[in-house]
Amino acid sequence: MENTNNNTGGNISTNVKLPKQTHDIFAIMARGHFISSNGTKDGMNRLYDVINNPENFDNLQAYFNVIRYNIERGNNFFYFAKIDEANSLIEKKLESFEKYIDIIDLFASMDNKITIGSRFRPSEIAEECNANVRLKQKLQKIPLYRSETLSNKVREICDLMTRDSFLEREDEESETYKVLDSYTYLMDIVNSIAIYEDTGNSGTEPAGGIIYN
Amino acid sequence: MINIASNKYADVEMSGNTCFVGTNNFGKTSLQRAILFFYSANSRGLGISASQKPFEEHYFRYENSFLVYEVATEEKNFFVIIYRHHKLNFRFVDSPYNPDFFFNENDEALKIGDVLKKLDKFGIYYSNQIDTFERYRNILYGTETDKMLSKFHILRGNEKYQNIPKSITNVFLSSKSSIDSRFIKDFIANSLSSESTSIKLEQVERQLRQFNEKYTDIETYLKKETQQLIELIDKKFDQVKMLKGSQLEMADKLGSSLKYAEVQNESIRDASKQKEEELDTLQNEHNAQKEHIEGKQQDIREEIGYYDRTIREANKKLKEYQSQNIEDAVEKNKQREQLQVELNMARKEYETLTSNVSSIELKYSTLMEQLKNERGSYINNINAKTSTIFNDYNERQLLAKNELNKKENELKQRREDALADASAEITSKQIEFNELKSEEKVIRNTRFYEAEIKQLETELAELRAVTYKNRSEKAIKSNLIQTLQKEWEATEAKIKSSLANQVTKVNNEIIKKKTEIKEIEGKLEVQDGALYGFLEGNIKDWHNTIGKVCNEDILFRTDLEPEVQKEVINSLYGVSLKLDSVNIVSKSLEEYQGAKNELLAQIRELEDSLNQFQVSNNEEKMLAADRYGKQLGELKEDVKVLSYSLELAEKREKKLMLELDDWKQKASEEIEASLSGNRNKFNLVEEELSILNKKKNNMLNDFNLQFEQLRAYHLDRIADLKERQEAEIKDIETEKDKTVASFDAKEKEMNEEKETSFKSKGVDSKQVKEVDKKIKQIQEDIKEIEQYSQIVNDYLKDKRELFDKLPDLIQKKEEYMKSSQELNNQLEEANRKFNLKNMELRKQKRSFDEELIEFNNGINYFTKNFRETPVYNKYEDVIERAEPKKTNYSVMDLCTQLLKNDSHFNEEYGAFQRYVNEFAGKFRMDNHFNFMIRNDASQAEYERFAQNVSNFIHENKIELSIAETATQIGLVTDSIASKVKELSGQQEKIQHIITLIADDFKKAEFEESKLIEFIKIKLEESDNKVYKMLKKIEEFKDEHGVFYGEGLFNTDYATGGKNKEINNRAVKLLENLRLSIKEQEQEEIRLQDLFELKFNIKEGMNETGWTHKIDSIGSTGTDILVKAIIYITLLHVFIKESSHRSSKAFKVHCIIDEVGQISAHYLKELLKFAKNRNIMMINGLPNKSGLESHYKYTYQFRREEDGNVRIFPSIVTEVEA
């Protein structure tokens, strides 16, 4: 991820007109969270519209570049990428991402696949997992702590994904979650994973496993 | 108080400042509450906390509990009884209070019924039972219309009389020692407003939330990404529908095919068997016919052979006869008899001539005969020899000939056999060849897949007809859509212009009314300093005098400096006038206020009517939208359906065309395949035939060669034999010629001797010689003829038997030939027919067999590879319900295709679901479009969702929603603005009250004591965030008039741009208001939120400065004093404001509990301050401290042994009041 706006200078904030939501945007994205167009909590969709405004986008990009953040645009979502991030940090991120592979695998294996915009209750997923051995195994395979019941495990997954801004708890009462546009980010990463076999005829190649493109 | 709370009876006089002395919990406050209840008659507004017993239960424990209030007016005394009968009730009694009314002779309190009986007994008037607090207050404060009860008014209150009890209550309830402007604000506001004058923020928030939600929904809907998703959903839904339709169709076909296969299996098996039998029968029949024809042919061939042979032999014989000049022989044979006659005649002549020399003749004849015989014998001998040789050689020749014949016959036989074999082979090949030829002809004439092709052609023709119809229908509907759209636009324009006209009209009227209000307000503002104010203050009933002769302009002039001159008080500049019949020109302030209120009401009405008009206009708009939208939606849906069907038809046509081409191709391929098979065979057979012919020819040549060789050998042998024969015969002939010559010489010698003898006897020898010569000649001729007689006879016999019959034979042969040809034709025809039929039957049988195999394969495939799949479960119903029917597709193909298509369908459906989820996810859960889909929704629900989205688009419901939301923003803005206006309208009153209070403070005679130098009060703008936002909305409305959100979403480019800024501002204002409400968590905006109050109090050297809250001005006593002063002022101002000016002066109580810490000096000042304002103080003191001496009445509270409280008067002294 290269800095495309290095020439904006340090006094950018004095020269450009930043939207008044800049602070809110920063507060969300600097935590590594996403701003999705279909998010409703805390006016997320409004923030998306603000960033999506071309004029604002340029100004915000220039502004955040100064503090070495780059706004990355996904399909209906935005997030920050740190410019010149250390490899060790990237590695750490990838490690923390690994559990999502199993979660996405589980979600994609459901009868009613969970996709962008899907609304579901953890209990529904737990029920389906309970009724389907394959799904149950997949769920049990996901390494999380609170695993005394399937429902709790699903809840924990939902909490994790909500924390990471991939889901949104839309209705507290009915415990309904909505899948946000940022879920595409997870899907994209999973899709860019290439699995290769160890051919065994080359001593230089690493052992079989996954690599990220 | 009779049996009230813990007090059995108390009679408290309160016609002056009154003081209650008693320690806590002795019932001081309860008594004060009972006094307050007289004024307020509101059991819930007495400051009783929720943990305490309600007023009714605490005070009225018994049936004979009474609160009795006696009121003294200028004219008389009356009293009010309050008692509990389920709920609290009131009765006004037109009599001074007398305890006897309530007690019996045993001093026991009576029940209300008995009390009333007593009153009846005394003939005292009492009112009916009044069972509502409201009515009681109306009677007490003089707004009751019942004239019978007007005697119980304590004042003539105006519409604001409620302020009096409210004020008294508020003073009583404010027990804090510190003075907070908020309390004063509340006091003023509560006195001015009723419950309904506040703006319920919950309601506003709800309206705003509803608007905001709708707005957000529409905004989300109009987003580019959402529109793209809609398109994708629409497209995918069409695809999914089409795929599903085709899957269902295919499932139905599969079901039909399966059922058909099951049903037809047995019958096809039977049919195949039947065809086989038919084939056998056909073969047998054909064989029989063939045999019969061939039998006939054989007979005919034999006949032909016979005739042919006979003719040939006859011809041969004839040729042989001709070669022997048979015709000459026959001709000569005819002359034989004549020659015989001539011979006989010659012999007679000879005998006649030689009758003289008969002995010589005889001698010589004998000699001659002898010689002749010798010669004859020799010749015979030689001839015999020759004949023997000849015969021998002839025999040899014959043998050779026989041998030749034998060999020839053998060869011929071989040749015939070989030929017969070859010909049979050739014939069979020729038959085969002919069969193939006719088969080709049949194939060429056969139309393969005729039924399918015909069906497809029919289907195509029907499809084209439907397409043509649909195309015209689509064109018509599209035109209709355009027309309707134009009509709709025209209607909308009409509605808009009518709204705009109405808005202008109403706004003009409102402006007019406002001008009038301003005029009235101008008058009201100046009235104090004008003649009007002067007259109000100084001249009693001036409306009936001056008011009749003075116009308004003069009344409201401020420069007239009026003064009262006693002398001319009832005259006009000294001229007295009888004004009874003159109408009053002047109006009272209430009338002005009334007029103003009426105008305000009219404005409100106008605004309401405008709102109503707007609502009805919107309704009209919505109706039009609904009507046109629905029609357009339906039409658009129709057009879409038509387009879709056209598209489908086009696809179907293409498909059918392809199928047709396929079928045609298949047919031609089938022909080609059949032909190529046939042709191969044909070529093979042709080749074989030519080989056979060649072989036959070779064989014939071979045989011919053999024949020739045989003949040549034979001829050689014959020639050799003939040569040898001729040589031998020649040798014998040579010898014979020699011998015959010797005989001839001897005969000549004898003849010459004879002649000489004759001559010697005189016989003419010359004539005898001639006759003899003639005889010899005839004999020679006869001999020659006899030589051929055998052949001629044979010939004649042959001629008779053969040659003459030859034409008949030829004709017969030809007839047989013809018959043979006919039989050949017959056979050929039979073969052709047989082949054709055979082929047809074989084809049918093959087709049945193939069908059977296909059915079985299909059923097996279905059972093994399809029935266990989820696809089967999915379409089980359709498959199982299908009717048995023949289709153009095999079960296997259908199963494979269904499985293949299902995977495609699943892919497409997955995409479709993803789009629907993404689309629905863009909206709130409870969005007003109802775009909501559960995660576990069924396919039907997803499809219904897509259908709803499609309907939504085609019926253009977004326009309706936009119109509704636009109306809503107008209504919300308007409603908020009206509420704010209504509430702000009270601000003038507040200003008025504050002015009065300020004036009243000024009038306070603090200067005398210099205890309090001044108390100042001022109004400031409210810093309530919500109110500020509300105000902004009101200003916005004032600025833009009636706002109806046209072009709110910028979809209408004609008007959108113009109103964009206004709309954005409105939306932003409403959003900010909503956020403020949420942030501030305030339930309502009341009058007190509209302004801020600030005080500035100076006591001695202490000045508080302008402040909201005065915690301590000086000592606690000072604070209580200031507080009491403020309360009294407030009460005074409100009483003044809440009663008619014409009302006579009346006194009320101001109940302030706990004034124990006030100094005597201050108390004195306070009581004086109250007295000047016709207010009597009721205060509570914890104990006697000397302060009580300043009150007119002092009561002490004591708890008796039985727990009851006794109230008794203490010192009844009024030091200074």
Image (spheres, rainbow, N blue to C red):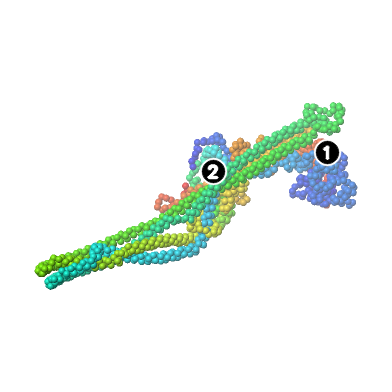
Checking the image for residue B23, the label placed there is none
Q: Where is residue A60 in the image (x, y as percent from the top left)?
A: 54, 39
- Taking the spot 82% from the left edge, 28% from the top edge, the residue there is B563
| Up/down of B612 relative to B774, above or below | above
Left or right position of B1115 against B308: right
Q: In this view, does B824 lie above or below B1085?
A: below
Q: What residue type is labelled 1?
A: Phe
Instruction: Please say whether residue B779 is visible from this viewpoint.
Output: no
Between marks 2 and 1 in the image, the one whose residue lies nearer the viewer: 2
Q: Distance between the residues labelled 2 and 1?
A: 75 Å
The numbered dot on residue A78 is 2
* Location of residue B318 by image quarter: bottom left
Report whether B474 appears left or right of B857. right
Give x and y (percent) for residue B110: 86, 51
- SS of the residue under disc 1: loop
Give how far across and how far down residue B848 sits, in percent: 46, 61
Q: Position of residue B977 (x, y in %)?
A: 68, 38
What is the chain letter for disc 1? B
Q: Is B839 in front, or is B41? A: B839
Q: In which quarter of the image is residue B494?
A: top right
* Element type where label 2 sits in the image: strand
| Whether residue B600 can be seen here | yes
Q: Which amino acid does label 2 sit on?
A: Phe
Q: How many other residues sit within 10 Å of disc 2, few (<14), some (14-19) or many (≥20)?
A: many
Q: Is residue B648 above or below residue A23?
A: below
Q: Residue at x 50, y 55 (%)?
A: B898
Identity of the residue drawn at 30% across and 66% down: B800
Residue bearing the label numbered 1: B1146
Q: In this view, does B918 lie to the left or right of B988?
A: left
